Image (cartoon, grey):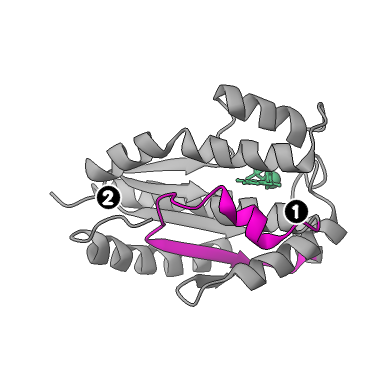
């Protein structure tokens, strides 16, 4: 049996990542391909709880301290990521290191500094960037509850994502209907699964 794939979704808040991740995971499981839905931040760990306190505006933390927390939250799960993928499980992950860099550099911090703590993390086999007009996203359900859900900030985040974007990223028009996006994603992810089965996960 080949390894599972490491598939990451990125984008601004309320761009539809979570909805599409859920649909995709259900679809892959319905085909008998063992798939799990993951998300970062993973709020259930001790580090994740600290991040949650910050994101929900209960607690204050220095920008750089919280950046390192987000990165540590990924690092603490690396052994499990590797184990799952080696055992043939595909991980569909809602946000990863690119969010880490985009959100902190949008505050004005040097992008290289932001990237440093994530160097060496497992590299996704595929990245889907959900591209949405920030104003359209801001009228979607319960926008504005969490710390970063402010249109002016999201615009900066989007610019940072644009400069992080690699040629291999799949850019999805997140303004399209849920069904259309889902169809596009299913087709594309099946190709990714087939392609990476006999390759190694890289860093
Ligand atoms: N976020 C997420 C960061 O600032 N850095 C990170 O490394 C990650 C993974 O956390 F506003 C931000 C992005 C978002 C917030 O994430 C909560 P969700 O996916 O919206 O729950
Ligand atoms: Mg959010």
- Tell me the number on the disc at residue 140: 1
Judge from the rendering whether residue 187 lies leftward or rightward of residue 97; answer left or right: left
Please, which residue is most extreme toward the top here? 46
Tell me which label, 1 or 2, sits earlier in the chain: 2
Residue 27 relative to residue 98: left or right: left
Q: x%, y% of residue 52?
A: 69, 30
Left or right, 154 with reference to 101 = right
Residue 167's place in the image compared with 9, above or below, is below
* Residue located at (84% from left, 52% from top): 150
Query: In the picture, residue 83 is in which quadrant?
Result: top left
Percent coordinates x, y for residue 15 in the rendering: 65, 58
Vertical arrangement, residue 75 with respect to residue 94, above or below: above
- What kind of element bears circle 2? loop
Q: Residue at x 75, y 53 (%)?
A: 140
Tell me the element at label 1: loop
Q: Which is nearer the eye, 133 or 139?
A: 133
Q: Residue at the location (37% across, 69% down)?
A: 188
Question: Residue 47 location, x and y as percent?
Answer: 60, 27
Label 1 C-beta lies within 8 Å of the nearest ligand 2 atom: no
Identity of the residue drawn at 80% across and 58% down: 108
Residue that extends furthest to the left in the rendered view of this protein: 1
To which residue does mark 2 refer?
4
126 part of magenta stretch: yes
Which stretch is magenta?
108-134
Q: Is residue 46 visible?
A: yes
């Amino acid at each position: 049996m080949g390894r599972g794939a490491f598939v990451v979704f990125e984008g601004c808040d309320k761009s539809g990542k979570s909805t599409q991740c859920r649909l995709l995971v259900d679809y892959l499981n319905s085909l008998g391909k063992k798939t799990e839905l993951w998300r970062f931040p993973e709020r259930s760990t001790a580090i994740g709880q600290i991040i949650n306190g910050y994101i929900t505006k209960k607690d204050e933390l220095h920008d750089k301290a919280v950046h390192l927390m987000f990165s540590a939250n990924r690092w603490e799960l690396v052994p499990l990521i590797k184990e799952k993928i080696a055992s043939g499980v595909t991980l569909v992950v809602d946000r990863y290191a690119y969010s880490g860099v985009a959100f902190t550099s949008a505050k004005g911090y040097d992008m290289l500094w932001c990237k440093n703590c994530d160097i060496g993390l497992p590299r996704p086999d595929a990245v889907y960037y959900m591209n949405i007009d920030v104003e359209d996203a801001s009228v979607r359900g319960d926008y504005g509850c969490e710390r970063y859900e402010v249109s002016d900030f999201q615009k900066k985040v989007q610019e940072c994502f644009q400069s992080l974007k690699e040629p291999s990223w799949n850019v999805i028009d997140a303004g399209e209907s849920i069904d259309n996006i889902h169809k596009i994603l299913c087709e594309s992810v099946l190709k990714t699964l087939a392609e990476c089965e006999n390759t190694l996960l890289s860093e």
